[in-house]
Amino acid sequence: MQIFSTFEHSLNLELAISALEQNGIAKEHIFAVPLTNRKAERRLFDTIHSTDGISLISTGAALGTAFAVIGASVGFKLAWGPIYWGLIGTAGGFLLGLLIDIFYYKVIKKRQRLQRGKNSEVILIVECHEEIGDTVEEILWYHFAIGIARLKI
């Protein structure tokens, strides 16, 4: 039987391997494979199939609303009137907010990874007899395995 599990690369992985060796599993039957996690740049525009939860419109909408109020208020004293200046303020505020968000996510947060939370970094493969499969699984769960799968050979 083979038991596959994924771990973060941490001290818990080393403790799990030590616990397996102490329970009678030889080093030759434990195999750890490090994974290369994907490092991709953040996409600014989402597709219908993937989204990262970041909105480029929210700052633009807030600034558009604020500039619309200011434009309409000042527009009573200007030649084109409050409606035109309110619309100009809306467009200007929205474009300013959109540019701020694009600058923030392209320049400031350029290197931030897309994945959040726990990431699998190592696959641990343990070859053992079916009798001790439950014990091996308990050891792996105890040492914070992210996921476990059994394969009967």
Image (cartoon, rainbow, N blue to C red):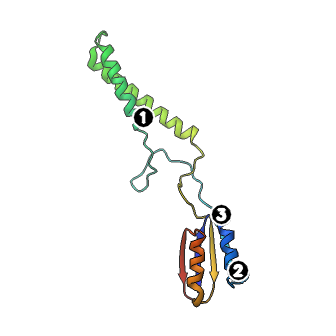
Q: Tell me which residue sits at (72%, 84%) in the image.
A: 26
Query: In front of the other: label 2 or label 1?
Result: 2
Give the total of numbered labels: 3
Q: Which mark is residue 59?
A: 1
Which residue is labeled 3 in the image? Answer: 9
Looking at numbered disc 1 in the image, what kind of residue is underneath it? Answer: Thr
Q: Tell me which residue sits at (54%, 81%) in the image.
A: 150
Does residue 97 sit above or below 75 in this rendering?
below
Locate residue 109, reporting x and y percent. Answer: 56, 42
Locate residue 93, reporting x and y percent. Answer: 40, 27
Quadrant of the rendering where the N terminus is positioned: bottom right
Mark 2 or mark 1: name the one nearer the start of the chain: 2
The Cα atoms of the two marked residues, 2 and 1, are separated by 55 Å
Query: Tag 2: Cα neighbours inside 10 Å, few (<14), some, or many (≥20)?
Result: some
Q: Secondary structure at mark 3?
A: loop
Query: Tag 1: Cα neighbours inside 10 Å, few (<14), some, or many (≥20)?
Result: some
Q: Tell me which residue sits at (50%, 47%) in the image.
A: 43
The Cα atoms of the two marked residues, 2 and 3, are separated by 19 Å
Which residue is labeled 2 in the image? Answer: 21
Locate residue 34, reporting x and y percent. Answer: 66, 67
Mark 3 or mark 1: name the one nearer the start of the chain: 3
